[in-house]
Image (cartoon, rainbow, N blue to C red):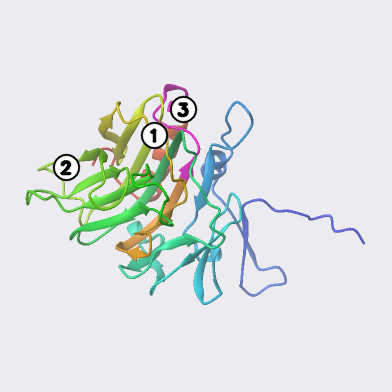
Amino acid sequence: MPNYIQQLDNIAIANLPGRYGVIDIDPPEEEAIVNISDEHGAPIVQYWFDPAAAWFTNEAGYLTWTERMTGEKFHVSGAPTLGPGINAQPALLLDGTGRVFSASGNARFNATEFTTVMVCRTAVVPGVKMLVGRASSPPEPTPVCPMLMLQEASSGGRDILASRENGGAGVIRAAHNSASFDYANANLLVMNTFSTRAGVGLRRNGAEVARNVAAVAPLTTTTFALGGDLSSSSFSGSFQHIFICRVDLSLPQWAFALERIESFMLGKYAIAMGS
């Protein structure tokens, strides 16, 4: 007998009583976002990390997060747990001892244009809390990497949101700090936008907070990890929805997609626009 049901896109079958379990269909707005395509018909969302428990398994001794656009497996080291995060929504909880990294090593950013979209929260920001770091040590001495971090301000002021070229004392491509906002204990929707046309931008909770139009060098290292850099781990707190896009959402042609993604994320996690 032919198998007429060959693929159910974006449908999770929960392990609940019943012959087929309970079918959980994604909200229409989430479906619409991941189906936005560029002029060549390719989805602009390259990686989609969904924090619902259905996308986590235990494999090879790790809690493993299955990314939804490609099916790529990402291992989570340290002592991660799953639980409620912002607005009591599902979250991956890290304690500063683990990071999220590609099991195959093949996950990569687009070198000339990308946007990182992350919903997260951390209680404290001593030193550096890495949101996106390098997956492996690059061969070149001064690589350009897609790094994004929360960093303790050296002046003793408020913590900063920063996009760096590389680790350690690497060049800051864009940064934001403000006497009126503390990144610790804040519900955050953060974005790092980049293209060789528009440079680097940082957005927080629906508003751009930093822009460096001179930072147009393409990435030389495109592999990445979440929550740590190289073999180190530094993020403690919650990771929730994460999109990594292959386009710069700050460009005018993607204004509709930027608005749609931010509206969805801010609404889902009850984060006030511009807060």
Question: Which image quadrant for residue 185?
Answer: bottom left
Circle 1 or circle 3, nearest the eye: 1
Q: Is residue 37 above or below residue 183?
A: above
Question: Which image quadrant for residue 163?
Answer: top left
Q: Mark 3 points at which residue?
A: 254
Circle 1 or circle 2, nearest the eye: 1
Q: Mark 1 points at which residue?
A: 194
C-alpha separation, residue under disc 3 versus residue under disc 2: 26 Å
C-alpha separation, residue under disc 1 versus residue under disc 3: 13 Å
Give left or right: position of 84 versus 46. Answer: left
Mark positioned earlier in the residue sequence (3 or 2):
2
Q: Where is residue 215 in the image (x, y as percent from the top left)?
A: 32, 31
Give left or right: position of 126 versus 48. Answer: left
Disc 1 marks which amino acid?
A: Phe
Q: Which residue is drawn at 42% across and 39% down?
A: 219
Secondary structure found at label 3: helix
CB atoms of marks 1 and 2 within 8 Å? no
CB atoms of marks 1 and 3 within 8 Å? no
Q: Which residue is drawn at 37% across and 44% down?
A: 143
Q: Which span is picked out in magenta?
A: 244-256
Disc 3 marks which amino acid?
A: Trp
Q: Residue 177 bears which disc, if any?
A: 2
Question: Which image quadrant for residue 55?
Answer: bottom right
Give left or right: position of 214 versus 80. Answer: left
